Image (spheres, helix red, strand yellow):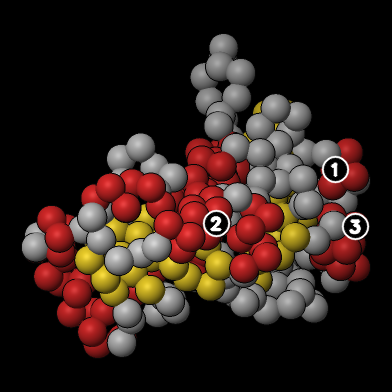
Amino acid sequence: MLSATRIKQLRSLHQKKYRRHENQFLLEGNRLIDQALSADAKLFEVWMTQKNLDSPFGKNILQKFEEKKIPFSVAPEKIIRQMSDSLNDQGIIALAPIPVYEKYDNPPKMAIYLDGIADPGNMGTILRTAAWFGIKSIFRSHECVDPFNSKVVRSAMGAHFYFSHFEAISEEIVLGDYSKSGMEILGSDMNGSPIQSFILQTAKGWIIILGNEAHGIGETAQTFITATISIPGIDGMESLNVSVAGGILLHTLTS
């Protein structure tokens, strides 16, 4: 049985300062934890309700825990709810170390720079989309929402475990290196060239900047842009959600 002190300690990981101090975070939900296992993520421990354990999903994932020698315990629904940050917990929570990523050195051939992404749902969706399209390098400004925020983690659905680079770094450093390397630095704007007509064949590599939901790409990052691209749409709509736009752009850039 989990002690009140241990529950409190685990619950504290929903706050950034405690996550960073402990270098750990929580995963909640069947699909997310199953996806983490598929990515060969390290899990310290897992807690499940008896109801979940008795389900077809529970029987299947239990076998994976045993194969990977991951400690697990049955916990009452009340305890799972106390540890959970979700209104609709699925009766399973896992404790994982924050992954260790490669330290940035040279500009990768394909990358994303997140410039002040503030909404956790947007951040998580962008990460999930990036992983889907095989983007291994994500860089972010220090103004972005914490990527291990519980809502980001749920929205990303295991994407955190697929990246090689995932670092908070100033735009001057990473975009400056892309500029010196002669790679394309792409920015999205409604007045830019249609993405369908943009040609990448001769590019040495590229990084695309996705800007803040309310203010777009910051002034500093804008100074590095070598090509401004757009997603054509019907007149009258103000703009696309940044995570939706990011998905469309990545689909085109990686096709």
Q: Earlier in the sequence, mark 1 or mark 3?
A: 3
Asked whether the beta carbons under mark 2 and mark 3 sit within 8 Å of each other, the answer is no
- Height in image: 132 above or below 62? above
Few, some or many C-alpha atoms within 10 Å of disc 1 (few <14, some 14-19, many ≥20)?
some
Q: CA distance from mark 1 to mark 3?
A: 11 Å
Residue 13: mark: 2
Q: Quadrant of the N terminus?
A: bottom left
Q: For the residue labelled by badge 3, is the local secondary structure a helix, a strand or a loop?
A: helix
- Height in image: 134 above or below 82? below
Q: CA distance from mark 2 to mark 1?
A: 35 Å
Few, some or many C-alpha atoms within 10 Å of disc 3 (few <14, some 14-19, many ≥20)?
some
Left or right, 82 with respect to 223, comes to left
Question: Which-is-in-front pick, marks 2 and 1?
Answer: 2
- Height in image: 97 above or below 145? below
- Height in image: 33 above or below 187? below
Name the amino acid type tagged 1: Gln
Residue 129 in view (yes/no)? no
Instruction: Return the x and y of residue 159 as percentages of the image width and height.
Output: 47, 62
Residue of label 3: 172
Q: CA distance from mark 2 to mark 3?
A: 32 Å
Question: Going 28% across and 47% down the picture, which residue do you hit?
Answer: 78
Name the amino acid type tagged 3: Glu
Residue of label 1: 222
Q: Earlier in the sequence, mark 2 or mark 1?
A: 2
Instruction: Return the x and y of residue 68 as percentages of the image width and height.
Output: 31, 86
Instruction: Return the x and y of residue 195 as percentages of the image width and height.
Output: 60, 43
Question: Going 47% across and 70% down the picture, which residue do you hit?
Answer: 96
Left or right, 180 with respect to 138, comes to right
